[in-house]
Amino acid sequence: MAPSNQSLTAEYRASDAATRSFTQALPGCSRTPATEERTAYLSALHTSVGKMQDVVNAFLTQKMEEDKNAAGSTADAATDAKEEENYGEEVVEDEG
């Protein structure tokens, strides 16, 4: 018998006490699944993780825009493009 009500859940918590929960439903899977059932469950899990990532990324992008607007940021498009281009990389500035 497959357990019911399984879900993938992520929670966002900010320092300003704002929270948001994200949930994706998962199919049930028995305690001793056959290979086909295990494969189907893992495929559904993979799909759910991708959907969750898309929803969380959209939320975080929106949150970043709200924070940027609240701070009255006057960063121009060139600065934004440079930061996005170098995202995740160490940038060494020239001193001269």
Image (spheres, grey):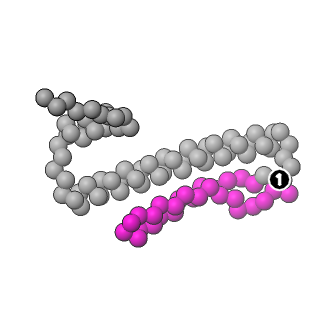
Instruction: List x then y, in percent, for residue 63.
Output: 35, 56
**Is residue 39 located in the magenta-colored stretch of the structure?**
no
Secondary element type, mark 1: loop
What's the residue type where badge 1 is placed?
Ser
Determine whether, in the image, residue 25 is placed left or right of residue 2.
left
Image position of 83 with respect to 29: above or below: above
Task: Name the residue that disc number 1 marks.
Answer: 30
Name the residue furthest bottom: 17
Quadrant containing the C terminus is top left
Instruction: List x then y, in percent, for residue 36.
Output: 81, 39
Determine whether, in the image, residue 70 is placed left or right of residue 45.
left
**Is residue 26 located in the magenta-colored stretch of the structure?**
yes
Residue 92: name its quadrant.
top left
Toward the viewer: 89 or 62? 89
Residue at (55, 58) in percent of width and height: 10
Q: How many marks?
A: 1
Magenta residues (range) = 1-28
Toward the viewer: 28 or 16? 16
Instruction: List x then y, in percent, for residue 21.
Output: 51, 63
Residue at (69, 59) in percent of width and height: 6
